[in-house]
Image (spheres, grey):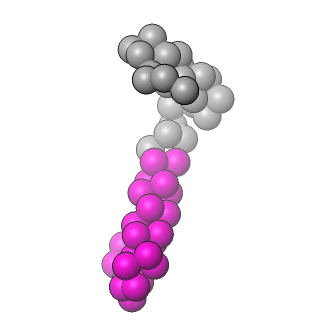
């Protein structure tokens, strides 16, 4: 596994856009961010917050 170059990143982004479409991307990223925050909180032992 080497480093990803510019063309590989462009290709991955193009495939993601083809699969999910442009309207779903912000929704997917928001969900990913929430999941990462929950994981971080659980790892650190912090209580979850329900702020939206």
Residue occupying the point 40% across, 70% down: 40
Q: Position of residue 44 (x, y in %)?
A: 37, 79
Instruction: From this view, report whether residue 1 is shown above or below residue 45.
Output: above
Q: Position of residue 30 (x, y in %)?
A: 44, 54
Would you say 21 lies left or right of 37 here? Answer: right
Helix, strand or loop: magenta stretch: helix
Query: In the rendered view of the protein, which quadrant contains the N terminus?
Result: top right
Toward the bottom, the furthest residue is 47
Q: Is 13 above or below relative to 31?
A: above
Q: Is residue 28 left or right of residue 47?
A: right
Q: Is residue 7 magenta?
A: no
Q: Is residue 44 magenta?
A: yes
The residues colored magenta run 27-52
- How many labels sit on residues? 0
Residue 42, percent from left and from top: 45, 78
Describe residue 48's horizontal placement relative to residue 12 as left or right: left
Give residue 36's quadrant in the image. bottom left
């Amino acid at each position: 596994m080497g480093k990803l170059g510019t063309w590989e990143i462009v290709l991955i982004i193009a495939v993601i856009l083809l699969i999910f479409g442009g309207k779903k991307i912000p929704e997917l990223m928001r969900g990913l961010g929430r999941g990462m925050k929950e994981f971080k909180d659980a790892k650190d032992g912090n209580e979850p917050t329900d702020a939206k």
